Amino acid sequence: KRRRRLTTEESEFLMVQFNLNGRPTAQERDSFARHLKLDRRTIQVWFQNRRAKLK
């Protein structure tokens, strides 16, 4: 699969969610994936990377 950068809107949505809760449940991640029409794994990796960046 080719890598695709998130749009500004997608990034902003995920940042808002991250600021509310940096460790969303699987159900919450599924909900974000459906809302953004992205793969569940993409959402999971985004949160992992964001948490790692804060270290």
Image (spheres, rainbow, N blue to C red):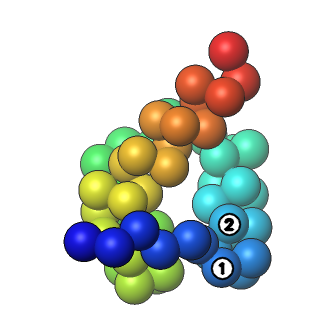
SS at mark 2 in the image: helix
User: Where residue 38 is drawn, which disc sits there?
Assistant: none
> Where's residue 10, x and y in %?
63, 74
> Where's residue 53, x and y in %?
66, 28
Could you tell me which residue is drawn at 71 percent across and 24 percent down? 54
User: Where residue 7 is drawn, which disc sits there?
Assistant: 1
Could you tell me which residue is drawn at 46 percent across and 81 percent down? 35
Q: Is residue 27 in view from this perspective?
A: no
Q: Is residue 10 left or right of residue 40?
A: right
Q: CA distance from mark 1 to mark 2?
A: 6 Å
> Where's residue 16, x and y in %?
73, 58
User: Where residue 11 is drawn, which disc sits there?
Assistant: 2
The quarter holding residue 5 reads bottom right
> Where's residue 23, x and y in %?
50, 35
Q: Amino acid at mark 1?
A: Thr
- In the foreground, 5 or 17: 5
Q: Is residue 22 left or right of residue 54?
A: left
- Give the class, few, some or many, for how many residues have Cα within 10 Å of label 1's Cα (few <14, many ≥20): few
